[in-house]
Image (spheres, rainbow, N blue to C red):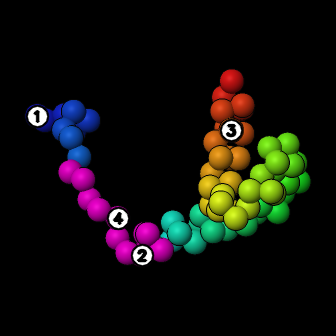
Amino acid sequence: MVNSASTPQEYQAPSLSQLREDSEMWESLKQASAASSGFQRWQVERDIEQQQETVTLDQQVSSYLRETLETLAY
């Protein structure tokens, strides 16, 4: 009898509908995060508002969420 837990799963590329769903979820998360007072305070603390031409909202939200999760994990 083969133990299915030890059998590696074959990689399957995400479907187009899954990619679309993930993209919509990221957009929603990004907009909600950007509207939060915590994110706005984070921008001010890092003086990011002055750098908005070079730093995209995607990059800002990614950094904000990463730092927030790292702080919570600590």
Q: Are marks 1 and 2 in contact (CB under 8 Å)?
A: no
Which residue range is magenta in the image?
A: 10-20
Residue at screen point 44% across, 69% down: 19
Of helix, strand and loop, which one carries label 4? loop
Q: Amino acid at mark 4?
A: Pro
**Residue identified by numbered label 2:** 17
Q: Earlier in the sequence, mark 1 or mark 2?
A: 1
**Residue identified by numbered label 3:** 67
Q: Where is residue 1 shown, x and y percent of the image?
A: 11, 34
Q: Nearer the viewer, mark 1 or mark 4?
A: 4
Q: Are marks 3 and 1 in contact (CB under 8 Å)?
A: no
**Residue identified by numbered label 1:** 1
The correct choice, above or below, for 19 with respect to 46 in the image is below
Q: Is residue 64 magenta?
A: no
Tell me the distance, in whole angstroms, between the alpha carbons under discs 1 and 4. Answer: 30 Å
Q: Nearer the viewer, residue 20 or 57?
A: 57
Q: Amino acid at mark 3?
A: Glu
Q: Earlier in the sequence, mark 1 or mark 4?
A: 1
Q: Are marks 4 and 3 in contact (CB under 8 Å)?
A: no
Q: Is residue 15 magenta?
A: yes
The correct choice, above or below, for 44 with respect to 16 in the image is above
Q: Earlier in the sequence, mark 3 or mark 1?
A: 1
Q: Looking at the image, can residue 55 be seen? A: yes
Within 10 Å of disc 2 (Cα), the crowding (few <14, some 14-19, many 20+) is few
Q: Where is residue 74 shown, x and y percent of the image?
A: 69, 24
Looking at the image, residue 42 sits to the left or right of residue 27; the answer is right
**Residue identified by numbered label 4:** 14
Tell me the distance, in whole angstroms, between the alpha carbons under discs 4 and 2. Answer: 8 Å
Q: Amino acid at mark 2?
A: Ser
Q: Nearer the viewer, mark 3 or mark 1?
A: 3
Residue at screen point 70% across, 64% down: 53
Residue 60: name its quadrant: bottom right
